[in-house]
């Protein structure tokens, strides 16, 4: 009887992890498509700002119903640093660079560049965290990932520019660095609490940058496409996806959770092709394959470990002191 209960718990744990993984990957993948569609009607920084205005309202409503004040109250310096890393880096600057950079690329290419995230995360972890080490295996994997992005940046890819690739790469760096900074901060707040605080902080940052860039509400064109894009990036990928993603970090750890960035390009590429008529060149597809090979070199062991650990129902993750990058 006890063995049956344990087996059922294992299955539930695996199913929950997979559900969080797929939810985050699919909803985040749709972000690139919705952003590309909406940029025709909204200036990029204001687009980001309104997105997080909507997300902040949704998350505040969720917190009012399901969380207590004690759950949300920062208690330590680490909590404040964790909130700042979440709001300013993982959410704020990441999306600022994404929406600005995607003006010069396709949805699929933008997602491929962002798939550098799980390759960059171990690099920052090796520098900032004493329990992580950077091995030859990780170095080769990162080199392959960067080589793939160079191929993706090939001008023959159609609708792609080097400046767009550079801006998007900055977003991947901000996201990876922020994920490691959260762990370095050793925050006591839950991922949900950090998200509830972080999205409004990202909204403030985006509004300030929008004002500084001279963007105006007068330049917004209110069309069905613009409204649909805002609703999607504000509610689904601006609130629901972040709740799933940060819950996945709590369950599987930052490095393993960031493996979602390798399913996201598939979602965004298919979405861009089906909804926006975007196409990818053969060179770009080869670049994606090279990036994927770098991911497999670094993350293949993490995939298996994530499934095993989620099945045990515990949070044995890359956040453990015994973890390493190999």
Image (cartoon, rainbow, N blue to C red):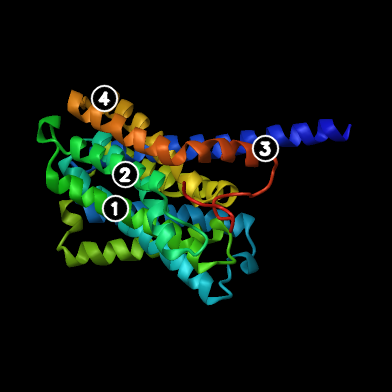
As rendered, which of 193 and 262 lies closer to the eye? 262
Residue contact between numbered discs 2 and 1, judged by CB atoms under 8 Å:
yes
> Which residue is at the front of the view, 42 or 316?
316
Say left or right for 124 vs 286.
Answer: right
Where is mark 2, residue-wise?
Answer: 114
Residue identifier under label 3? 311
Foreground label between 3 and 1 = 3
Residue 319 versus residue 60: which sits nearer the camera?
Answer: 319
Which x, y percent locates residue 308? Answer: 63, 37
Of discs 1 and 4, which sits in the foreground? 1
Q: Distance between the residues labelled 4 and 3?
A: 36 Å
Query: The N terminus lies in which quarter of the figure?
Result: top right
Mark in front: 4 vs 2: 2
The image shows residue 11 at horizontal and vertical percentages of 69, 32
The answer to the question of whether label 4 and label 2 lie on touching residues, with beta carbons closer than 8 A, is no
User: On residue 273, which mark appears?
Assistant: 4
Q: Of circles 4 and 3, which is in front?
A: 3
Q: Is mark 4 on a helix, strand or loop?
A: helix
- How many circles with numbers are drawn on the protein? 4
| Residue 2 higher or lower than 171, as above or below | above
* Image marks 4 and 3: residues in contact by CB distance under 8 Å: no
Residue named by callout 1: 171
- What whole-number distance in Å separates the C-alpha atoms at marks 2 and 3? 29 Å
Q: How crowded is mark 2: few (under 14 residues within 10 Å), some or many (20 or more)?
A: many
- x and y percentages locating residue 171 in the rendered image: 29, 53
Q: Is mark 2 on a helix, strand or loop?
A: helix
């Amino acid at each position: 009887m006890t063995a049956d209960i344990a087996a059922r718990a294992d299955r539930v744990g695996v199913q929950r992890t997979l559900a969080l993984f797929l939810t985050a990957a699919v909803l985040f993948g749709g972000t690139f498509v919705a952003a590309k569609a909406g940029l025709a009607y909204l200036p990029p920084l204001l687009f980001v700002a309104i997105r997080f205005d909507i997300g902040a309202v949704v998350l505040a409503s969720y917190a009012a119903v399901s969380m207590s004040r004690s759950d949300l109250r920062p208690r330590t310096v680490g909590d404040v640093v964790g909130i700042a890393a979440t709001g300013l880096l993982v959410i704020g600057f990441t999306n600022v660079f994404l929406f600005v950079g995607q003006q010069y690329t396709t949805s699929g290419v933008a997602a491929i560049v962002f798939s550098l995230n799980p390759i960059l995360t171990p690099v920052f972890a090796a520098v900032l965290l004493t329990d992580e080490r950077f091995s030859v295996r990780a170095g080769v994997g990162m080199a392959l990932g960067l080589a793939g992005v160079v191929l993706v940046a090939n001008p023959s890819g159609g609708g792609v520019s080097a400046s767009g690739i550079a801006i998007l790469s900055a977003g991947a760096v901000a996201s990876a660095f922020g994920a490691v900074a959260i762990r370095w901060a050793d925050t006591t707040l839950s991922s949900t609490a950090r998200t509830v605080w972080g999205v409004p902080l990202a909204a403030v940052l985006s509004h300030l940058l929008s004002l500084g860039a001279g963007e105006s509400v007068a330049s917004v064109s209110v069309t069905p496409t613009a409204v649909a894009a805002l609703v999607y990036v504000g509610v689904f990928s601006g609130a629901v996806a972040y709740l799933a993603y940060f819950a996945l970090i709590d369950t599987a750890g930052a490095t393993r959770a960031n493996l979602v960035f390798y399913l996201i390009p598939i979602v965004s590429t298919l979405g861009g092709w089906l909804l926006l008529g975007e196409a990818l060149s053969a060179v770009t597809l080869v670049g994606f394959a090279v990036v994927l090979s770098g991911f497999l070199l670094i993350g293949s062991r993490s995939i298996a470990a994530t499934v095993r650990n989620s099945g045990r129902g515990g949070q044995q993750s890359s956040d453990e002191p015994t973890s390493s990058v190999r």
